[in-house]
Every structure is written in structure tokens, then in C-alpha cells.
Amino acid sequence: MISPYSFSSSVQPIGNPMQLNVVLADNHQLFRSCLRALLLSHSDIRVVAEAADGHEAVRASEELSPDVVIMDIEMPRLNGIEATSRICSREPHPKVVALTMHSDPRTAGAMLDAGASGYLTKDVAAEELATALRVVSSGASYVSNRIRSALYQTPPVAPRLGSRRPAAPRRRVALSPRQRDVLSLLADGKSVKEIGWLLNISPKTAEVHRRQIMEKLGIFTIAELTRYAICEGLTTVDA
């Protein structure tokens, strides 16, 4: 028997390709119902499923291929950070926007490192959430100013066993205008080939810029580069 909290019980057929298809992942049914009602007022956003835990969120993302998953962090069976990591490990994968009570920078950093494209707290206005969904679906990132400021003040966590180099403290470094362009596009999820096309340079030149940026910043993962770009205002965040 299907649980009343199973995402399968609330699946809606995916129709209009101009709409953003969204999965809501939160273990509180009342919150999901309220959030669904708020998003109904936006004609370009469609909630196609709800998930009450991380496992259901992963399964919904695999079976429905939504554009965005709105992900809580504290959920039973599988937390939102691990669920995000599993969702983002597959290609192609939906964008993930964290919507949580947690405002501490280490939790936000862990969520972004897991692959989330956005991070908002639950005191956010409904209009801002809708804006965040549209922004991340376009390939950019969206992080609230409060979280962004906190991330900048917090050094990156130590790398996992097997990482090539130790984590370096975050610091301000003078990047050239071209390096800033490349970093912004990297943070928006563009590949080296796409960056070359957008900037009218060869993929090899784009790769050289990427390597030089990493060496200059002392950052050697795309996740940390994304966090740095968010903190420096080089990728899309709220005003």
C-alpha cells in the first residue's frame, strides 16, 4: 500500500514545457501543502510531486526528471544533503534549491558542496523563492545575501581523504577581468567547451584560465569555486 506521504500519491503529469516542474521535499506535510498553494499563484511553476524524506526525493527526481527539487535538510531516512549529493551525481540531473531553517554557514557550505544551486531559509518570501527557482533553472546560482556573507567569513572545510591538496583559507585575490568571466561561467555550471564558445576563445585557453584561477585562489574543486564566486558576487544571487 502506498504511504500517504509517498511522492507517488501526489504525482501530477508533466505537461507544458514552458513551466518549471518542481518536486517538494520536506517531511512536514502541512508545510508542503502551504508551499504548494503558494507556488500555484505562479503560472510558470508546477509542482509535480511531493516527497517526505530524502529517499523519496531521490526516487522522484529519477522517475520524473523535474527541473528543480526544493529540498529540506533535516528529513528522516536520508537527510537533504545526502539526497542532494545522490541526485546531483547523475547526469542529467535537476537543480536543487535548499529551503531550510538552518542559516549556519557550514551547513550551507555542505549543501552547496553536495551540488545544490540555491540556498534559502524558510523565512523567505514566496516571491523570492519563485525567483530563485527561475534563476537556478537557467543555470545560475541563487543564495541569500545573509548566507552569502556568512559563507565568505567561514573557511572551507578540510577536503575528504584522497584530495589532491589541503584546503586553503579563503582570501581575496585579484583576478583578471577574463579570469572573473571564466570563474562566473564555471560557477554557473558551464563546461570548458561552453565557456570557450561563450567567450570566443578555444576550449584549451578556457582550461588554462580555469587552472590558473584554481592555482591563484588555492581552490581545487568546482564546488569551492562556486562558493567563492557566490561570495564575490560573480554569480546570480538575490539583490
Image (tube, rainbow, N blue to C red):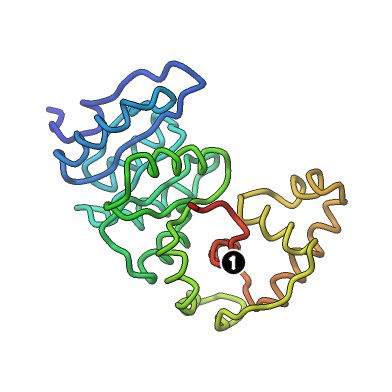
Which of the 4 quarters of the picture holds residue 198?
A: top right
Q: Measured along the vertical axis of the image, is residue 67 above or below residue 199?
A: above
Q: Residues within 10 Å of mark 1 (few under 14, many from 20)?
A: some
Front residue of 184/80: it is: 184
Instruction: Residue 158: give x, y in percent of width and height.
Output: 47, 79
The amino acid type of the residue labelled 1 equals Glu
Left or right: where does residue 190 sit relative to residue 202? left
Left or right: where does residue 238 sit relative to residue 121? right
Give the SS element for disc 1.
Answer: loop
Front residue of 86/175: it is: 175
Q: Residue at x 40, y 22 (%)?
A: 43
Instruction: Residue 78: give x, y in percent of width and height.
Output: 26, 53
Read off the residue under disc 1: 232
Front residue of 151/27: it is: 151
Instruction: Residue 71: give x, y in percent of width and height.
Output: 33, 47
- Residue extending farthest to the front is 239
Q: Residue at x 52, y 38 (%)?
A: 137
